[in-house]
Image: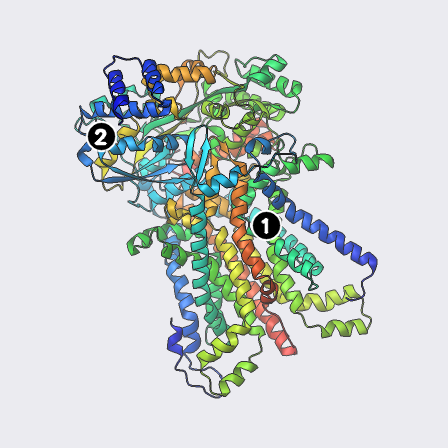
């Protein structure tokens, strides 16, 4: 335990910084553990700069940026980019709206609400790969209970993940089912920790509730919304389990998101160079977006602190 | 072994007793057929051991990487025989089929020496072989000091021996000159029709004799049956959609996936007029009488539907139909089997095959001991045990197909199975051109099929686009 | 919010009922399937009428599946054990490493603190495929291949960033005044952390730990690539019922139920912390 090293710190006046080293000592173990795991990341960058197919070892050579440059003229890459972003925006957006709505419904601290909020976590506890398997059965036109039920409301011939026009919707639906609870629980926690005075003041002033919601609740909830959206975005843009288990990226190229493409490139085509380049681009996109989120998050927190 | 039973088995070994009398005799002593076969297996192993020193690696161990499969179950059920005969230890890791090949690729790509041998398909060795991950087994097969005289390599079906051997030069024929034996056939499946006899009788249909008839029969079944559809074929975005019924029918019209030029370069061949015609029929068949969720259909859904009575027939692996005729499937016992030649002008079916094979890891530290295991696992005795008592079907050895007990079992519970096999066996082989882009190109092909079935692109245009992409990829990889 | 109209209460009730139906229906259906054989699951049309059977659970728990092909061994219970070892182990380590770091980021503005915090977050989105294969090689050299320790280390990529960022927000919410007072009265930094900060942050730590636990529990690519069959978690184990001779839906459903149960128990136990604990980034006046 590196903490032990920090014990002898003598109590100074308040703790402005304590011993200058303390925060580093506290955070470094975490950093080191992760960096240790990520040493291979460098290897991956090296692979991405190579022409490297495991099935053609004789043709392996450095081609520097060629894998990346090839993407520019590769329609399947642009399709992948577009599908991944669409998927991310759709899932994160819908889950935020739904998650917020449910959190608002459950805001009051009653036993029933608490129990419901925990039971709603059940989809999140189901491993996505297995959940997708079950959804695939439930949407099967012969034995699937969902296919059967939508048949009653007039969608006799609904093809779910099998039709290009509904495949995206279907996987988004499963994603919503699995991950909305995650957002719900984070936002519920946020809602319940909001101070009550501003709302009471607004109620006294006769401010309509929906105005209060947009003027007070939403802004105060923003840091929570950002964190929830950030963690969901990280997962969603990297979605693999649900999409692969339900459609393998099809029909056609409808759902060839980054991870599916990279997985097929790696494990089936064993085209390591292309796969690594794809994943590094994905990593760069994620890095960019999360940086954006974090900057805003920090700013919001600073501002909020300043106001009080 | 228990005394009295042992004498009986030895009498059988000396050919003083027929197998049926033996089993009857053992049954009288309260020995079940399975145990009887184990006894026979042990006794044959003893006999085997007389010509060859099976114990030379006694005390060593091998570790296997296996797919969760009935073949694996059969092997594990018989493993004690091997251990007793050789004094070797056998460890194994069994992984679910869904993730099995990911595990294999990961283990081999990291050059792990953990596994000595593993299960594979022939297509996968087109990557593993050139990548230097598996060993040319011809070295062992042809070495009389390492292989028992009774192994009888030539007993393996010729088409399968060839289909698992390749020189590694893209476009070279399988089993051709300079071919290396990357793996040993273990069990295989060929693609034919499995159909629900009850449903066929109900609407007065007979198994179709060619593609036109298949399209019509499937349509008739869909129309006349209440709730079941005509024909199940796979449709997911994967190589697995192309290789079963689809390629078997395609090859029957003399069509190939790629053309190999005199200088060895490869180019797409799936946009010929004959190919376009074939695709049109196939797509029409799926649209009119295939599963509604076709584009998500894999082995599992195709099989499940047949077994549960949701589909009237499938054009897929014969053993898929075999599995669905047993277990807790609703239609177990109702299924029949028929050979299928898509081309009316063809003289016989040309089923493309999937061969579950055994390969030796190039990183194994004890290759001779590993070979001892491989030759037992792919030997006649184990094949007989598996075929008679377990679901180690289809056998890859002629002698097993000739075995009375096996034939009797099949004839009794699987009507038409042996017949479809015998008609198709001469033409059963891999019809793909071996080359390192196999998975890229077949996935592309499947994705194009999906777009054509969804009417997103007309057949002619779709196939021309496919050929363009295939040619581009081949060029990129330095093959075109 | 005290004075809800009756209409509003009704609407709220209906909305909640819809939400619960949507999220619970598949779960209920899975539970029902777990009491059925494949034969009744695969009926057309699907139906609620069936004779319940415990055979799926029996097969999973006893580890023996008796079928007409003989007796098959099922490793499911050891898979469940592996999941428990891996998840508990990695969450524990992540808490030991992550909570002090979170405290450092929350209480001390030090040079590079935001950069380090962000770097830690960025580990969360390193695509596993990129890292795993080279990692297999290094692990073999380090002797970590196919060990729980090695796996738990890799699992930090899932657990540590999540815990760090949630707990950090929670620490920032707690007013530092109490801690100041405690330290001024002569207590060491460590004593302050242990006696004041940690107990105050307990709900946050519990909630973050639970979420990390769920994500660790659901992972399967790490163990699949890095470990042999005897160290696979339930997520891989349940796939064993997808076999060449058919998908055993009943057993998969039972496997899902059994694999959810421990997490659900944990969540119900930590229920009162769960919501309160996730109030990261809360801004109190």
On the image, the x and y values in percent for residue B267 come to 42, 29
**At which x and y percent is residue A15?**
49, 83
In this view, the residue in front, A213 or C259, is C259
Chain of the residue under the numbered disc 2 shown in the image: B
x, y percent for residue B131? 32, 39
Q: Residue at image x 33%, y 42%?
A: B108
Is residue C4 positioned above or below A84 on the image? below
**Residue shown at 72% from the left, 69% from the top:** A216
Badge 1 element: helix
Depth check, mark 2 against mark 1: the one in front is: 1
**Same chain for the residues at labels 2 and 1, yes or no?**
no
| Measured Cα–Cα span from mark 2 to mark 1 | 53 Å
Residue matched to label 1: A123
Nearer-the-camera pick, B74 or B168: B74
Residue A257 showing in the rendered view: no
- Label 2 sits on a secondary structure element that is helix
Residue B140, label in figure: 2
Image quadrant in which you'd find residue A153 = top right
Which chain is mark 1 on? A
Judge from the rendering whether residue B428 lies leftward or rightward of residue B286; answer left or right.
left
In the depicted structure, whether residue A23 falls above or below residue C60: below
Nearest the viewer among A132 and B162 is A132
Above or below C211: residue B107? above
């Amino acid at each position: 335990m590196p903490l032990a090293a920090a014990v002898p710190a003598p109590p100074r006046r308040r703790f402005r910084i304590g011993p200058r080293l303390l925060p580093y000592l506290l955070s470094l173990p975490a950093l080191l553990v992760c960096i240790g795991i990520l040493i291979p990341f460098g290897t991956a960058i090296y692979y991405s700069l190579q022409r490297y197919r495991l099935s053609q070892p004789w043709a392996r050579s450095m081609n520097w940026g060629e894998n990346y440059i090839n993407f520019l003229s590769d329609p399947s890459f642009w399709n992948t980019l577009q599908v991944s972003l669409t998927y991310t925006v759709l899932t994160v957006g819908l889950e935020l709206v739904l998650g917020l709505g449910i959190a608002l419904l459950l805001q009051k601290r009653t036993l029933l609400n608490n129990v419901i909020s925990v039971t709603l976590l059940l989809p999140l506890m189901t491993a996505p790969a297995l959940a997708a398997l079950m959804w695939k059965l439930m949407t099967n036109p012969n034995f699937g209970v969902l296919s059967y039920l939508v048949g009653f409301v007039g969608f006799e011939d609904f093809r779910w993940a099998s039709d290009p026009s509904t495949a995206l919707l279907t996987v988004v639906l499963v994603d919503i089912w699995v991950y909305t609870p995650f957002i719900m629980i984070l936002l519920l926690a946020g809602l319940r920790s909001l101070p009550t005075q501003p709302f009471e003041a607004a109620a006294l002033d006769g401010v309509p509730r929906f105005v209060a919601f947009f003027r007070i609740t939403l802004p105060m909830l923003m840091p929570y919304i950002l964190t929830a959206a950030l963690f969901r975005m990280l997962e969603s843009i990297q979605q693999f389990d649900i999409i692969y288990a339900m459609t393998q990226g099809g029909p056609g190229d409808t759902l060839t998101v980054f991870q599916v493409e990279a997985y097929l490139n790696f494990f089936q085509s064993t085209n390591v160079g292309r796969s690594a380049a794809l994943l590094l681009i994905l990593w760069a996109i994620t890095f960019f977006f999360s940086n954006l989120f974090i900057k805003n998050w920090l700013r919001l927190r600073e501002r909020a602190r300043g106001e009080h | 072994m228990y005394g009295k039973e042992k004498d009986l088995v030895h009498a059988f070994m000396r050919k003083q007793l027929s197998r049926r009398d033996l089993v009857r005799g053992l049954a009288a002593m309260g020995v079940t057929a399975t145990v009887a076969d184990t006894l026979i297996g042990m006794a044959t192993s003893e006999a085997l051991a007389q010509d060859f020193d099976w114990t030379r690696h006694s005390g060593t161990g091998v570790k296997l990487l296996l797919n969760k499969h009935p073949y694996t179950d059969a092997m594990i059920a018989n493993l004690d025989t091997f251990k007793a005969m050789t004094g070797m230890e056998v460890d194994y890791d069994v992984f679910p089929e869904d993730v099995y090949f990911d595990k294999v690729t990961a283990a081999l790509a990291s050059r792990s020496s953990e596994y000595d041998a593993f299960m594979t398909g022939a297509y996968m060795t087109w990557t593993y072989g050139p990548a230097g991950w598996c060993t040319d087994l011809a070295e062992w097969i042809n070495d009389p000091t390492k292989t028992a005289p009774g192994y009888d390599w030539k007993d393996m079906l010729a088409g399968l021996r060839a289909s698992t051997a390749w020189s590694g030069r893209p476009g070279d024929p399988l089993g051709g000159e300079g071919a290396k034996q990357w793996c040993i056939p273990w069990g295989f499946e060929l693609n034919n029709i499995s159909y629900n006899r009850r449903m066929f009788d109900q609407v007065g249909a007979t198994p179709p004799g060619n593609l036109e008839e298949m399209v019509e029969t499937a349509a008739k079944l869909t129309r006349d049956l209440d709730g079941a559809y005509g024909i199940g074929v796979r449709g997911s975005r994967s190589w697995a959609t192309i290789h079963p019924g689809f390629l078997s029918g395609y090859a029957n019209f003399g069509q190939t996936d790629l053309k190999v030029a005199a200088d060895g370069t490869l180019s797409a061949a799936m946009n010929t007029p004959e190919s376009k015609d074939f695709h049109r029929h196939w797509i029409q068949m799926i649209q009119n009488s295939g599963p509604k969720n076709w584009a998500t259909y894999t082995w599992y859904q195709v099989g499940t539907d047949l077994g549960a009575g949701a589909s009237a027939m499938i054009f897929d692996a014969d053993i898929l139909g075999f599995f669905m005729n047993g277990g807790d499937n609703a239609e177990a016992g109702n299924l029949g089997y028929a050979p299928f030649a898509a081309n009316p002008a063809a003289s016989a079916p040309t089923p493309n095959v999937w061969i579950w094979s055994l390969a030796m890891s190039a990183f194994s530290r004890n290759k001779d001991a590993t070979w001892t295991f491989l030759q037992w696992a792919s030997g006649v005795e184990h094949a007989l045990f598996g075929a008679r008592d377990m679901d180690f079907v289809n056998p890859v050895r002629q002698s097993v197909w000739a075995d009375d007990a096996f034939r009797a079992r099949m004839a009794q519970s699987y009507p038409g199975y042996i017949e479809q096999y015998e008609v198709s066996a001469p033409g059963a082989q891999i019809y793909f051109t071996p080359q390192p882009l196999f998975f890229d190109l077949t996935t592309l092909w499947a994705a194009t099929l999906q777009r054509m079935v969804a009417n997103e692109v007309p057949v002619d245009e779709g196939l021309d686009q496919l050929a363009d992409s295939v040619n581009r990829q081949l060029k990129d990889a330095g093959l075109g | 919010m005290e004075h809800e109209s009756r209409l509003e209460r009704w609407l709220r009730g209906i909305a909640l009922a819809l939400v619960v139906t949507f999220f619970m229906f598949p779960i209920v259906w899975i539970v029902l399937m777990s009491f059925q054989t494949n034969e009744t699951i695969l009926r057309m049309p699907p139906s609620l009428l069936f004779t319940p059977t415990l055979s799926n659970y029996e097969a999973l728990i006893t580890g023996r599946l008796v079928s007409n092909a003989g007796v098959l061994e099922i490793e499911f219970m050891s898979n469940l054990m592996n999941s428990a070892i891996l998840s508990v182990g990695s969450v524990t380590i992540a808490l030991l490493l992550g909570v002090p770091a979170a405290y450092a980021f929350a209480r001390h503005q030090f040079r590079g603190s935001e950069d380090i915090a962000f770097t830690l977050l960025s580990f969360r989105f390193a695509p596993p495929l990129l890292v795993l294969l080279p990692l297999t090689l290094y692990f073999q050299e380090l002797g970590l291949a196919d060990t729980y320790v090695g796996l738990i280390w890799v699992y930090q990529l899932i657990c540590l960033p999540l815990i760090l960022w949630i707990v950090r927000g929670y620490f920032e919410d707690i007013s530092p005044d109490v801690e100041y007072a405690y330290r001024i009265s002569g207590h060491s930094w460590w004593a302050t952390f242990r006696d004041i900060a940690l107990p105050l942050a307990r709900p946050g730590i519990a909630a973050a730990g639970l979420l990390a636990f769920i994500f660790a529990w659901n992972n399967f690519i790490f163990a699949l690539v890095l470990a042999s069959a005897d160290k696979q978690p339930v997520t891989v184990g349940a796939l064993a019922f997808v076999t060449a001779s058919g998908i055993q839906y009943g057993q998969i459903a039972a496997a899902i139920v059994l694999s959810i149960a421990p997490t659900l128990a944990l969540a119900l136990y930590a229920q009162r912390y769960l919501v309160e604990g996730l109030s990261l980034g809360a801004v109190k006046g």
